[in-house]
Image (cartoon, rainbow, N blue to C red):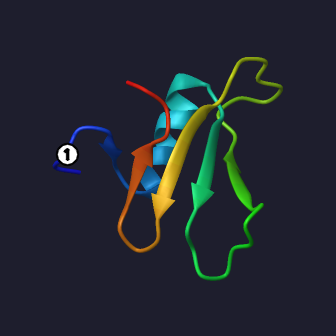
Amino acid sequence: MARDGEWADHVVVVAMARMLQIDIMIVTSAPSSRPKDIVWVVGQTAFQGDPILLGHVWESHYMSLQPI
């Protein structure tokens, strides 16, 4: 998390989704994932806006996949 654009761990990602009431979509590099696997973190039931898009480098960190 020392570089710009790198964010937190899973607990913080879930907490931020709930606090901001926005969904977060995560593309992961987990060994068990398939190329089309996407993890959704629901921040609010029936959220209508665009989700935040994050990448997850397996066993390392999350990073923004959107320009900041």
* Residue 4 found in image quarter: top left
Which residue type carries mark 1? Arg
Q: Name the foreground residue: 48 vs 38.
A: 38
Q: Name the foreground residue: 23 vs 66.
A: 66
Q: Is residue 20 left or right of residue 42?
A: left
Residue 16 position within the rendered picture, expressed as x and y whole percent measured from the top left: 47, 36
Residue 45 position within the rendered picture, expressed as x and y whole percent measured from the top left: 79, 30
The residue at 67%/81% (across/down) is 32
The residue at 76%/23% (across/down) is 47
Q: Name the foreground residue: 49 vs 18.
A: 49
Provide the residue designation for mark 1: 3
- Please, what secondary structure does the residue beneath circle 1 have? loop
The C terminus appears in which quarter of the rendering? top left
Residue extending furthest toward the bottom: 31
The residue at 51%/29% (across/down) is 19
Within 10 angstroms of label 1, few (less than 14), some, or many (20 or more) residues? Answer: few
Vertical side of 12 occupied by 33: above or below: below
Residue 40 position within the rendered picture, expressed as x and y whole percent measured from the top left: 70, 48
The residue at 40%/47% (across/down) is 63
* Residue 31 found in image quarter: bottom right
Residue 20 position within the rendered picture, expressed as x and y whole percent measured from the top left: 52, 24
Vertical side of 50 occupied by 23: above or below: below
Vertical side of 34 occupied by 13: above or below: above
Residue extending furthest toward the right: 46
